[in-house]
Amino acid sequence: MSNLPVIIGFGGINAAGRTSSHHGYRRLIVDHLDTQSRLDTMADLATLTNKATFINGLYYIAGQDQGLTQAQLEEQLGEELKHATLIRPIRAEAYDIHQLVLNKAAQIRPASGDCTCVRIRKRHLPNRLPDNWQVTSIDSDTAEVTISGSFSAILPDTKRATVSAAGQLPDGFEPGSLYQSRNHPRNLQMTVFGASDALSSTGIAWRTIQDQIAPDRIAVYASNSIGQLDEAGFGGLLKSPSVGKRITSKQMPLGYGQMPADFVNAYLLGSVGAVGSALGACATFLYNLRNAVEDITSGRRDLVIVGGSDAPITPEVMEGFRTMGALAEDHEVVALDASAEPDLRRTSRPFSTNCGFTMGEASQWIVLTSDELALKLGAQIHGAVPGVFVSADGHKKSISAPGIGNYLTLAKAAALTESMLGDQSLRLRSCVQAHGTSTPQNRITESHVINETAKAFGIERWKVGAVKAYLGHSQGTAGGDQLAVSLGVWRYGILPGIATIDHVASDVHNSHLAIQAAHHEVGTQGIDTVLLNSKGFGGNNASAVLMGPHIANQLMLKKHGIKAMDNMRLAQEQHAQVAADYDLKSIRGLSKPTYKFGYNVLNGEDLLINRHEIRIPGYAKGVDLSVLNPFEDMC
């Protein structure tokens, strides 16, 4: 009998805000929320972005002495907070889009005995000047460099970036300020915040969970698709020598793509369980989710934390994708709309007439357990993930072009849904969260995949969402964004429409699909299953089956019986209240992420080892050494 992987906690951060308690989801449907949910989310954004502080029951805006209620806070900051979220112009804190630095090589050969003079912005001068350079200050920003003799050099050059928009974290949110970040890359700062948010959302202390599980029956599967490429990671490692800076001792180790998993183990959990970091381009989150699901269904693990964290909004990464022709450039958006200026809130238009994707950044995490452990803990059940399917594309001409693998993964996900819940549930009460990148190629190829699958399974109007329209494309974490938004459907009954589009492109295959700008009003139990779809560069395809909490509870009821489920609900109420208390503290800006640096560090001498088990200080259960021979027929 297989275990059912259920979600008992979720959290993170993206362009819509904090993920836990559905705040990020709420931002997408903010105009359709009940009053209190809307006020809570606006207050959460205000404190998250340091625009307001909470003192003695009221909120205070910097520079104002008058305390405000949540309603008054929204009245003053509501529009500003909306504009500080979702896809919008790239902020100067990321980089200056008006003076994008693109160094160029120069071979300068002055006439014999002459000198060459160039003007350079002072911030572009190397730390160590060559002997044949003489620098004279022109003004506070510019220097004149007199160079004698023939030389080769890398001279800074600047231009206006042709891509101006991205799905950045909310303006003013600085994850590194919430703990001792010690020059961590932005990605890992987001990891600490996001994973902490997910753990706190369970409403169960980690020590309580840990005491119920043997240390080796826990796992963390997390990564990103391209590593940490800002100055504190691989970006600085590769760039520093060429601009006269020294490489630091942290840039190399903190740049690796598996660091999100390593940070969670070392600084949040203190886990000695399994760890892994699957990489699959845009499908990376779902690759890690698949490993977790297979571990839990097979009985190898009881609890797995799954996550991803990507911070790709750097000049180099943006320029790399731009030169591939993948990003929506300003002049292309202008041409689409026949306008004078690009609409930087609507650069991502999945399944409509479009010109490229918009970059995003995000950190998304879930706590996944077996149904047995969830029952034992009395944990909240937010959903279930019975299966994730992965396929490659076969032979290809271009490594970045799509192929046939996604037809296999989505069809298998649909088939599993039908097998578990019946054809009526699949046909009438399922929907798809599409990869939906907003590229002309994706709108054709992915719509054909979804449409053909709908035809094959007799689905007439399959509802399709595409959250990248709001959030941008957070690379390897994109599947986590899709999952987080999908969980909100079962709380508020709305599947967000593709709000940035005003039509479906003529080349989109949608004879059996429902693609629209307006939100789909489906009800809190009107959808049984959301199929999450990812298509990645290189031929990486993944489709996951995400079932709602009402379905997860039905499946658990059949397996465990009504008495066990009734007993579970008492504990669930307590844990839900603790989670609500955490949410309230976060709304007020009073919560801090977990970060345990140098805490309870153990050495081999601290272990108690015998033939049957290893006992680890601080863990209630030991590691069982009764390893069965899996090859009895061969030994």
Image: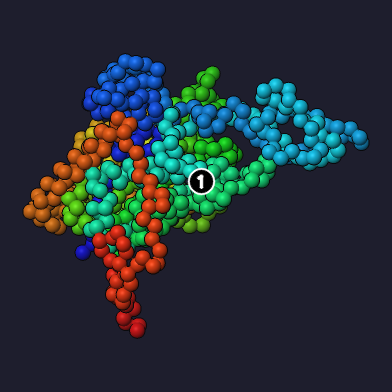
On screen, residue 8 above or below 498: below
SS under mark 1: loop
Describe residue 525's horizontal placement relative to residue 320 as left or right.
left
Please identify the quarter of the rendering in which residue 127 is found. top right
Residue extending farthest to the right is 112
Task: Give me the residue at 80% from left, 31% from top.
Answer: 146
Task: Give me the residue at 38% from left, 61% from top.
Answer: 602
Camera sees residue 449: no
Which residue is nearer to you in this view: 410 or 499? 499
Describe residue 567's horizontal placement relative to residue 474 as left or right.
left
Please identify the quarter of the rendering in which residue 497 is found. top left
Describe residue 43's horizontal placement relative to residue 151 as left or right.
left
Residue extending farthest to the front is 605
- Amino acid carrying label 1: it is Gln
Neighbour class for label 1 at 10 Å: few (<14), some, many (≥20)?
A: many
Q: Which residue is mark 1?
A: 228
Q: Position of residue 228 (x, y in %)?
A: 51, 46
Q: Position of residue 19 (x, y in %)?
A: 33, 38
Which residue is nearer to you in this view: 174 or 453? 174
Quadrant of the drawing holding the N terminus:
bottom left
